Amino acid sequence: MDYEVAWSPAALEDVESLADYIAKGSKFYAGAVVDKLLDTARRLKDFPLAGRIVPEFEDETIRERFVYNYRLIYRLHTKHITILAVIHGKRLLDSLDDRI
């Protein structure tokens, strides 16, 4: 399928904040989480439908993959994917309006 994957500014901020928070306890684990997030995002270009539909929205174009305890939330477009958010798995989403 070969989609192009792009990160929204908000999703990049999520990753940076997450890495800073985890690094307080373990720089190694922070690096491992970020590496796994980036790898998972890269793989979406070949397998965009591998993620499940985000239950809070029930929109087939908004999907997520779990990376450790975090949700990598993305939107499918015709030929590209936008990473919208990276949040903790226990957090429910009210809206992604400011990220779309």
Image: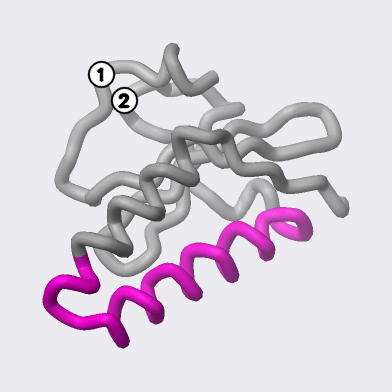
Query: What separation in Å lies between label 2 and label 1 (alpha carbons)?
Result: 8 Å
Tell me the magenta residue range.
Answer: 22-47
**Residue 32 is covered by the magenta coloring:** yes
Q: Is residue 36 left or right of residue 61?
A: left
Q: In which quarter of the image is residue 26?
A: bottom left
**Badge 2 amino acid:** Glu
Q: Nearer the viewer, mark 2 or mark 1?
A: 1
What's the residue at 53%, 35% (across, down)? 9
The 10 Å Cα crowd at callout 1, few under 14, some 14 to 19, many 20 or more, is few
Q: Is 30 above or below relative to 73?
A: below
Above or below 57: residue 65: below
Q: Mark 1: which amino acid?
A: Asp
Which mark, residue 94? 1
Q: Say which quadrant the C terminus sits in.
A: top right
Query: Is 67 inside the magenta-drawn segment?
Result: no
Residue drawn at (41%, 43%) of the image: 13
Q: Position of residue 20 (x, y in %)?
A: 27, 62
N-term mark: 2 or 1:
2
Q: Residue 83 carries which label?
A: none
Q: For mark 2, what is the residue?
A: 56
The image position of residue 33, as x and y in percent, is 37, 72
Find numbered disc 2 in the image and state the secondary structure of the residue it sits on: loop
Is 20 left or right of 7, judged from the image as shown?
Answer: left
Instruction: Label 1: state its secondary structure.
Output: loop
